[in-house]
Image: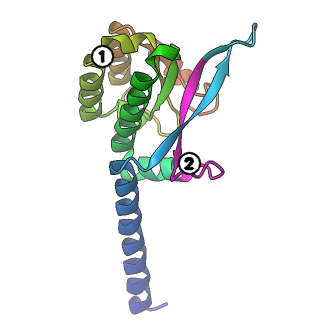
């Protein structure tokens, strides 16, 4: 390799990254994603306790959203996505309020660390106090929470409004027991 080849490769990688950022931001900003509902069952009775709201991008239910979510976490776009997913979930609950269905929405550890995300989330929740009876939150482990004491304050802020907060896929990530030792969930 020579310097010219390395420079061309780097330029190509940068252009590809910028295109991916713009594409993701356009998908999120344009609400170009859907929610799929996965039933969460009571272990003893088998009855549906609630549904987990999962994202599907561009209507592609066969494609895992994992690559999009990890990309968003790695590039700092996850807070924008998490708030867009929350808006879409709340909109769905408003339209289906009569069905009395509860849903859990995932929140990335990176969003938990974001003051702006917390401000935007509480602004959404404060408009409809009835949401506490139908909306749960699950903190994911795909991106590690940087400050667990700050995260616990975030959790307690939601709990003080009557919301339930859970750890998503407890035991699947390296931080599970560390989270459990500090977060009051």
Q: For this view, does 29 lie left or right of residue 180?
A: left
Nearest to the observer: residue 122 or residue 181:
122
| Magenta extent | 50-67
Q: How many marks?
A: 2
Q: Position of residue 12 (x, y in %)?
A: 41, 79
Looking at the rendering, which quadrant does residue 92 occupy?
top left
Q: Is residue 65 above or below residue 103?
A: below
Nearest to the observer: residue 57 or residue 43:
57
Tag 2: Cα neighbours inside 10 Å, few (<14), some, or many (≥20)?
Answer: some
Q: Position of residue 178 (x, y in %)?
A: 52, 23
Name the element at disc 2. loop
Nearest to the observer: residue 2 or residue 13:
13
Name the element at disc 1. loop
List the residue tagged with mark 1. Answer: 128
Q: Position of residue 150 (x, y in %)?
A: 32, 23
Decide whether residue 126 is among the magenta residues.
Answer: no
Q: Which mark is residue 65?
A: 2
């Amino acid at each position: 390799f020579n310097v010219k080849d390395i420079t061309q490769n780097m330029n190509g990688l940068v252009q590809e990254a910028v295109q991916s950022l713009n594409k993701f931001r356009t998908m999120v900003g344009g609400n170009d994603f859907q929610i799929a509902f996965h039933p969460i069952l009571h272990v003893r009775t088998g009855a549906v306790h609630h549904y987990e709201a999962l994202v599907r991008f561009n209507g592609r239910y066969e494609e895992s959203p994992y690559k999009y979510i990890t990309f968003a976490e790695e590039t700092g776009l996850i807070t924008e996505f998490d708030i867009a997913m929350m808006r879409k979930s709340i909109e769905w609950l408003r339209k289906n309020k009569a069905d009395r269905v509860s849903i859990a929405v995932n929140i990335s550890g990176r969003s938990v660390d974001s003051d702006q995300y917390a401000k935007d989330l509480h602004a959404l929740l404060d408009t409809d106090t009835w949401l506490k009876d139908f909306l749960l939150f699950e903190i994911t482990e795909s991106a590690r929470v940087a400050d667990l004491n700050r995260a616990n304050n975030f959790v307690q802020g939601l709990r003080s409004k009557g919301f339930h907060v859970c750890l998503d896929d407890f035991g699947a990530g390296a931080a599970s027991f560390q989270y459990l030792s500090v977060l009051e969930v």
